[in-house]
């Protein structure tokens, strides 16, 4: 039975994100639920308003207590019922989410935490309905043994299309073919992926674990528009088979439905996302496949409304090839268009709404996927009817008995084959899912939590993608010591807690739980372990409390959870832990921002005072009369210029504020990567050192041709090369100290030699005449300042040397291990003559 249906379109408006709130973005979307109408207003022209009509509209931007607020439950209640009805009726069903980067597609499809999306809800709902049907059938069978019975088989697969290559997300990355899987065509089932792993599941908890494993294998990265942007299209497929058995005739038939849930990567413009290198290549492939999808939708939309039929270019991209059934084929399809409310995303939002508007016209022809046995039975019945008409009564009865026996034997044989296949698939599922914790562990996975007391403390992972936080959970049982580390291919004995990531050693640390939930963490020799932002000394036990943050290696972030203990009062997430670990750098950044903001406020205040003064002068001239028209025109011109300068200043301050917000986020991503690079450099014995630096770049003519150059601060990674070998005049190298604790209580002298500064802004040479450098080390109350030197080049020589003396303490050792020495450069308009030493002996003061 065929059913012709149009693609249903749902539009979901997400809330403002933190970046949009910080920049005071304006709302440009209006949703009218009763009319099913979505209106978008051009931020540059309030009279330019466009209106679109869709099947479903969800406004998640309004407050949660607003009756029009659309939660995850609202979306599921509308779309989930249709999905379940299609699955039980034997239709194929497709649901895909489209929108720009950061518009909330993954939130609608997958969700995170308690805010579960469509995919996990669909999986759970199918199993709940199976359980309900089985209980009804069991009650009916108790009354009548000849009642029909149903058995259910569910297989799941998960793939992503990354750079036009298909990757199986249920296969560990180390075992995957770099060339990707091949897409083939079948005359019966359409496009399929050759070699894609399909796992039979018998419960929702198994799907949950598989989805967690697949989600960790997904390709995500940070862009300026979204910190955890999906860099590939993800397709999660549920194959649902209902086997119906007639106990009286032993007749067996199948109804099969395929449910495809698609999370598309974000459409984007390279300039908006700040993509470079690999991110730019990925973005190119993403836009190529989405353009191909747009061409397919355009062609199908045109074919539905015009007589002249166009060739539908399904094979232009891997994505459209796999979605052939979903678009214009044998499936019922729903599209979720995710949009942003902010005026800064006007062009992308308008493009998404137009995209969704065209998709409404696509016509699909969905067919119930019945078993081939049904056709065979109909043919046999027709043939039997012919024989009945052509034979006499005695022969007819005899022939009927023969055919009946043949059919019974055929159905019995098929029933036995079905039962054997079912039992085989069940044992295969149990085998694969029993091995799955080991697979997950090898990839940095968690442990099974069955038969564990709910009050048992555990450590759980934190990830910058909230959907991946809480996936890994390791319980800390009573009176045991667990070793933490990565899987070692040499030793057979693996750590009891397996974690992955750069900088994690095979024997990284130990965690012990004693009585009264007394948990102790020990960092093993050579390992880098941070607790609440502080680097732990080796072989020293430290107590771990509820919601303490632990970082193993460079960026494997966990937190400790002790049930029934009070929370610390703040939300502990990945961002909180990374800010804590990099607090020194972020503190300097904040001080820099405060200076910039103060300078900007002062400049703004000066501008406003000048404008007010000019307005008062102009008012006085007007009161004196019209005899001094020349002075009045001159004052009006000055006032106009001053107001223009004020407007430019405000724009520049707004841009700088946005840049500071962006720099804060970039630092959190860059600092762990720089530390990883330094670890690799040491391991490979390379004489290279990487560090983070904030660099000001000149932006010529950004605010107009007559305006002086402005500056843009960027986060850059500086590569420095260490000099190898012992040169002439070098002192002999002292013996290395293996453990800093050996020198606690002793005197230590540290020599600091500031030779020169490199890369100062050249355009400041004319404005400033001298410069100096200052720094502060450990607990020194005052800054150490170099002498002022002439500022005549962008690489001025300092040649300042000093010796700092300290009494070594445990706090000093912690500082030396985990902190860094930062230098600040200051420019002055004061001219200096002679060297610093000469001025020091004379009367001239440097400060």
Image (cartoon, grey):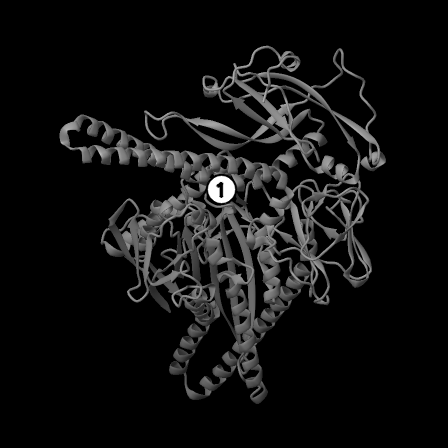
Q: Position of residue 29 (x, y in %)?
A: 33, 54
Left or right, 616 with respect to 759, comes to: left
- Asked where in the image residue 590 lies, by quadrant, the reply is top right
Task: From the viewer's side, name the closer residue of 368 and 138.
Answer: 138
- Residue lying at 50% horizontally and 79% vertically, measured from the top left: 403
Identify the residue under disc 1. 661
Res 600 quadrant in image: top left
Residue nearest the viewer, comparing 185 with 48: 48
Q: Quadrant of residue 571?
A: bottom right
Query: How many numbered badges does the structure rendering display?
Result: 1
Structural crowding at the residue carrying mark 1, measured as other residues with C-alpha within 10 Å and reported as few (<14), some (14–19) or many (≥20): some
Return the residue found at the far front.
624
Residue 531, position as x, y percentages in the image: 71, 47
User: Is residue 549 visible to us here?
Assistant: yes
Q: Is residue 391 left or right of residue 180?
A: left
Q: Position of residue 199 (x, y in %)?
A: 59, 59
Residue ranking furthest to the left? 627
Q: Nearer the viewer, residue 246 or 624?
A: 624
Is residue 275 among what the camera can see?
A: no
Q: Name the secondary structure under disc 1.
A: helix
Q: Quadrant of the N terminus?
A: bottom left
Quadrant containing the C terminus in the rendered view: top right
Image spot of residue 282 (x, y percent):
48, 40
Vertically, is 547 above or below 818? Answer: below
């Amino acid at each position: 039975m065929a059913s012709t249906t149009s693609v249903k379109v749902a539009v979901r408006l997400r809330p403002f994100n933190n970046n949009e709130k910080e920049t005071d973005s304006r709302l440009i979307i209006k949703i009218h639920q009763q009319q099913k109408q979505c209106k978008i207003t051009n931020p540059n022209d309030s009279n330019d308003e466009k209106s679109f009509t869709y099947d479903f509209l969800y406004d998640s931007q309004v407050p949660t207590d607003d009756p029009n607020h659309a939660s995850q439950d609202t979306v599921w209640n509308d779309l989930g019922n249709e999905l379940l009805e299609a699955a039980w009726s034997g239709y194929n069903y497709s649901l895909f989410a489209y929108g720009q980067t950061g518009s909330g597609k993954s939130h609608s499809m997958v969700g995170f935490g308690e805010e579960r999306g469509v995919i996990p809800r669909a999986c759970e709902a199918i199993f709940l309905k199976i359980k309900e049907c089985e209980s009804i059938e069991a009650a009916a069978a108790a009354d009548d043994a000849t009642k029909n019975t149903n058995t259910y088989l569910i297989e799941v697969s998960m793939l992503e299309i990354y750079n036009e290559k298909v990757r199986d997300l249920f296969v560990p990355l180390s075992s995957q073919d770099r060339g990707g899987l091949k897409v083939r065509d079948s005359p019966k089932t359409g496009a399929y992926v050759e070699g894609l792993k399909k796992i039979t599941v018998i419960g929702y908890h198994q799907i949950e674990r598989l989805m967690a494993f697949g989600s960790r294998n997904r390709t995500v990265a940070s862009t300026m528009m979204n910190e955890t942007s999906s860099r590939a299209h993800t397709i999660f497929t549920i194959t649902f088979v209902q086997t119906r058995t007639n106990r009286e005739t032993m007749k067996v038939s199948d109804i099969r439905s395929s449910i495809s849930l698609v999370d598309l990567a974000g459409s984007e413009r390279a300039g908006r996302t700040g993509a470079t290198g690999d991110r730019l290549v990925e973005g190119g492939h993403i836009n190529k496949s989405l353009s191909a999808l747009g061409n397919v939708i355009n062609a199908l939309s045109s074919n539905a409304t015009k007589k002249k039929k166009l060739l539908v270019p399904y094979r232009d991209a891997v994505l459209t090839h796999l979605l052939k059934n979903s678009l214009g084929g044998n499936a019922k399809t729903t599209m979720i268009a995710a949009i942003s409310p902010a005026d800064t995303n006007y062009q992308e939002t308008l493009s998404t709404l137009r995209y969704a508007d065209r998709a409404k016209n696509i016509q699909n022809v969905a067919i119930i996927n019945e078993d081939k046995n049904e056709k065979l039975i109909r043919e046999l019945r027709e043939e039997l009817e012919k024989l009945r008409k052509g034979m006499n009564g005695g022969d007819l009865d005899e022939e009927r008995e023969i055919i009946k026996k043949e059919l019974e034997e055929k159905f019995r044989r098929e029933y036995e084959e079905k039962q054997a296949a079912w039992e085989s698939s069940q044992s295969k599922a149990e085998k694969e899912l029993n091995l799955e914790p080991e697979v997950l562990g090898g990839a940095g996975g968690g442990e099974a939590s069955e038969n564990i007391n709910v009050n048992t403390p555990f450590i759980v992972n934190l990830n910058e993608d909230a959907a991946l936080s809480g996936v890994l959970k390791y319980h800390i049982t009573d009176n045991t010591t667990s070793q933490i580390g990565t899987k070692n291919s040499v030793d057979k004995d693996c750590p009891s807690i397996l974690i992955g990531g750069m900088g994690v050693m095979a024997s990284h640390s130990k965690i012990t739980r004693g009585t009264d939930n007394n948990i102790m963490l020990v960092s093993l020799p050579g390992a880098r372990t941070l607790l609440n932002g502080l680097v732990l000394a080796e072989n020293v036990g430290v107590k771990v409390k509820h919601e303490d943050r632990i970082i193993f290696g460079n960026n494997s972030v966990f937190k400790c959870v002790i049930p029934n203990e009070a929370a610390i009062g703040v939300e502990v997430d990945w961002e909180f832990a990374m800010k804590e670990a990099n607090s020194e750098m972020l503190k300097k950044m904040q001080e820099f921002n405060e200076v910039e903001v103060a300078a900007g406020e002062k400049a703004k205040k000066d501008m406003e005072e000048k404008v007010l003064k000019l307005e008062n002068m102009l008012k006085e001239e007007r009161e004196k009369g019209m005899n001094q028209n020349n002075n009045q025109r001159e004052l009006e011109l000055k006032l106009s210029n001053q107001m223009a300068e004020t407007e430019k200043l405000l724009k520049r301050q707004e841009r700088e504020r946005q840049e500071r917000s962006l720099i804060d986020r970039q630092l959190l991503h860059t600092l762990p990567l720089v530390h990883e690079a330094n670890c690799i450099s040491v391991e490979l014995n390379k004489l290279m050192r990487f560090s983070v630096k904030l660099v000001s770049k000149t932006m010529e003519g950004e605010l107009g041709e007559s305006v002086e150059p402005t500056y843009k601060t960027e986060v850059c990674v500086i590569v420095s090369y260490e000099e190898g070998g012992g040169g002439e005049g070098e002192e002999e190298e002292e013996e290395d100290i293996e453990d800093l604790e050996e020198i606690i209580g002793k005197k230590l002298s540290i020599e600091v030699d500031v030779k020169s500064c490199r890369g100062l802004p050249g355009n400041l040479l004319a404005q400033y005449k001298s410069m100096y450098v200052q720094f502060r080390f450990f607990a020194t109350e005052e800054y150490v300042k170099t002498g002022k030197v002439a500022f005549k080049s962008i690489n001025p020589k300092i040649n300042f040397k000093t010796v700092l003396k300290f009494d070594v303490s445990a706090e000093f050792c912690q500082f030396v291990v985990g902190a860094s020495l930062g230098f600040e450069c200051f420019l002055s308009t004061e001219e200096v003559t002679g060297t610093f030493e000469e001025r020091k002996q004379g009367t001239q003061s440097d400060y």
